[in-house]
């Protein structure tokens, strides 16, 4: 590994801390205390996405200078304001919990995945065909290159997709001064770490047995890492989606309407919407349930609604308007319902669930309807089932060959859902063990 | 009693299963990419020797050709949809340029340059790949602008271009 590559890797680590700190300060300002680390990290990225969109909207090109200046101004003002206005006391829920053997196993699984990413052994094909090429174009254009996206022969890059992941690669490249594949692929690691962290937080709330919690986290980490290595998930956006699903579902599951919960739900939904086109639908699901639940309890306030919905609106409205302005929405996104294809689609779905890198874990999804009937995992199962329903709807209405479509996408989409099924089942197993 | 015994068993079995799965995938990830038969572009990874060779050469092409010039990709005849995947790799390697496929008449006539892969102007595969009569093929200067280990770059002769 060369010295410039090591420098780029260091930059990824520094940016991770900066983005986390930025999000933490911002959520502190909007809420009533320090957010969970995952909420802070997601809020940081949503803020960066909105910042980049705003810079381009006012005609400021993304360059190393403009990025550094705007990051310094943004971080300075957020830190300054949150230092003066907010308590820095950690939330009792975030006090460090003692580390166990399951945390150590999860750390090893994460490290194993990180090594395969940085040595280019788990590179997602879409890093080449989609997110990476877009990032290069954005760097050269000094912003989202709509001219490139709008050319009909570039349809393979999914021109209508939200652009957060390519933006992450573009700003890293601009700040580093070079497009370093090992460093960019390493961005998958903090998102995977976030997935494990939020899973650990959720298990701490919903699984009373420490032993089952540790075993559950270790099993989840190993299973997801196996798929991430075997099905080449570094450099794709599906780990971002998996993180958004668990973070959003966990926030929804808390069932509270305090600022901390509202902002956790709001940032997870906005992050999903900025990550992938199916993330826009996930944001819709999270926000619909996130409004419906307090409404049924007569706890919905204007403040809660704003904190939950506003971050997503700030992401989705510019995305929709820019896509419409440049004619980026694809005709192949939606077709008509064709029930005669259900058999072939069903076979392809089963094939996708049985691919070797998954090692059978997707078959845990059959437990989701049962989890819906239980108190602990009900809300997270509801999110996963609705998202799964959306995927099935797309497959039965797609105007392209559905079998090819399922085979080429469903194994990856399962990554959004399998962690929820695993967490739900761990909580059920944990509930059967009496804690002393 | 049964429940108390079943929970640890379930947990140990789940851990052993996912631990074995992770170990298996790590071992596979460290297996070398076979040289023979060489993988086709759809199966390439950035560490695949053929991909590294192509990207390394395209780096030179990207810096040499005038920025923003339309470039068509013309590989040797490849099975199935492999020509499309090779085009994607070339597009990734030539970010400063507007890259189109030579196999698509509606896009390739825009090209100012043609990048070939494992093929030279005049090879039997040249016209076969394009699937149309020679007179519809862009007039190329016979000598390449750039010659590399995996392909060559030809300039389109503007005087011989029949339509834009």
Image: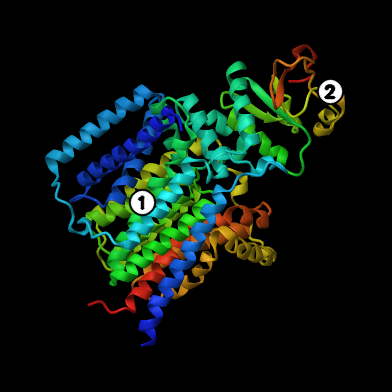
In the rendered view of the protein, which quadrant contains the C terminus of chain A? bottom left
Disc 2: host chain: B
Residue at the spot x=38%, y=24% of the render? A64
- Name the disc covering residue B129, or none: none
Residue B4 spot, x, y in % from top left: 35, 82
**Tag 1, which secondary structure?**
helix
Location of residue A394 by image quarter: bottom right
Q: Which mark is residue B122?
A: 2
What distance separates the C-alpha of mark 1 from that of mark 2?
Answer: 55 Å
Q: Is residue B107 left or right of residue A149?
A: right
- Is residue A143 rendered to the left or right of residue A432? right
Query: Residue at horizontal 37%, vertical 36%?
Result: A12
Image coords of residue A19 (percent x, y):
31, 39
Query: Which image quadrant for residue A292?
Result: bottom left
Q: Residues within 10 Å of mark 1 (few under 14, many from 20)?
A: many
Residue placed at 23% from the left, 60% from the top?
A: A98
Outermost residue toward the top in this view: B159
Name which residue lies at 57% across and 61% down. A392
* Quadrant in the rendering for residue B5: bottom left
Q: Identify which residue, A185 or B24, lies in the foreground.
A: B24
Q: Is residue A16 above or below residue A151?
A: below
Asked whether A268 or A325 is in front, the reply is A268
Q: Is residue A145 left or right of residue A21?
A: right
Q: Which residue is mark 1?
A: A194
């Amino acid at each position: 590994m060369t010295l410039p590559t090591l420098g780029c890797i260091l930059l990824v680590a520094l940016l991770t801390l900066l983005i986390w700190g930025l999000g933490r300060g911002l959520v502190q300002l909007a809420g009533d205390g320090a957010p969970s680390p995952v909420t802070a990290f997601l809020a940081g990225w949503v803020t960066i996405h909105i910042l980049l969109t705003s810079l381009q909207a006012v005609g400021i090109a993304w360059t190393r200078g403009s990025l550094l200046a705007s990051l310094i101004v943004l971080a300075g003002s957020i830190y300054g304001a949150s230092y003066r206005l907010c308590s820095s006391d950690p939330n009792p829920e975030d006090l460090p919990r003692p580390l166990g053997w399951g945390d150590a196993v999860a750390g090893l699984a994460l490290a194993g995945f990180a090594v395969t990413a940085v040595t280019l052994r788990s590179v997602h094909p879409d890093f080449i065909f989609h997110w990476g090429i877009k990032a290069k174009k954005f760097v050269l254009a000094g912003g989202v290159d709509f001219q490139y996206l709008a050319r009909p022969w570039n349809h393979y890059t999914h021109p209508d997709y939200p652009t957060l992941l390519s933006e992450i690669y573009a700003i890293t490249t601009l700040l580093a001064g070079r497009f370093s594949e090992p460093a960019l692929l390493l961005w998958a690691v903090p998102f995977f770490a976030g997935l494990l962290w939020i899973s650990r937080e959720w298990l701490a709330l919903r699984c009373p047995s420490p032993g089952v919690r540790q075993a559950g986290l270790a099993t989840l980490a190993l299973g997801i890492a196996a798929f991430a290595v075997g099905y080449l998930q570094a450099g794709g956006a599906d780990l971002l989606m998996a993180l958004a699903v668990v973070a959003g579902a966990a926030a929804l599951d808390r069932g509270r309407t305090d600022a901390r919960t509202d902002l956790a739900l709001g940032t997870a939904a906005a992050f999903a919407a900025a990550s992938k086109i199916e993330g826009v639908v996930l944001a819709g699901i999270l926000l619909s349930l996130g409004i419906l639940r307090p409404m049924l309890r007569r706890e919905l306030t204007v403040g809660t609604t704003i904190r939950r919905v506003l971050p997503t609106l700030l992401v989705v409205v510019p995305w929709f308007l820019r896509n419409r302005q440049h004619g980026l929405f694809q005709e192949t996104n939606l077709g008509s319902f064709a029930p005669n294809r259900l058999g072939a689609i069903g076979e392809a779905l089963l094939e996708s669930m049985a691919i070797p890198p998954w090692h059978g874990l997707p078959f845990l999804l059959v437990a989701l309807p049962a989890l819906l009937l239980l108190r602990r995992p009900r809300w997270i199962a509801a999110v996963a089932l609705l998202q799964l329903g959306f995927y099935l709807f797309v497959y039965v209405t797609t105007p392209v060959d559905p079998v090819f479509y399922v085979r080429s996408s469903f194994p990856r989409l399962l990554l959004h859902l399998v962690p929820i099924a695993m967490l739900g089942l761990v909580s059920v197993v944990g509930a059967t063990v009496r804690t002393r | 009693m049964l429940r108390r015994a079943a929970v640890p068993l379930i947990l140990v079995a789940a851990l052993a299963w996912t631990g074995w799965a992770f170990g298996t995938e790590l071992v596979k990830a460290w297996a070398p990419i076979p040289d023979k038969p060489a993988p086709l572009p759809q199966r390439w990874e950035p560490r695949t020797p053929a991909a590294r060779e192509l990207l390394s050469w395209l780096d030179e092409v990207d810096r040499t050709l005038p920025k923003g010039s339309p470039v068509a990709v013309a590989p040797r005849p490849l099975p199935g949809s492999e020509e499309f995947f090779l085009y994607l790799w070339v597009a990734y390697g030539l970010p400063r340029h507007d890259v189109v496929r030579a196999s698509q008449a509606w896009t390739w006539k825009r090209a100012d340059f043609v990048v070939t892969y494992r093929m030279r102007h005049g090879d039997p595969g040249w016209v076969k790949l394009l699937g149309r009569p020679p007179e519809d093929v862009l007039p190329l200067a016979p000598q390449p602008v750039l010659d590399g280990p995996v392909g060559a770059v030809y300039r389109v002769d503007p005087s011989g271009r029949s339509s834009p």
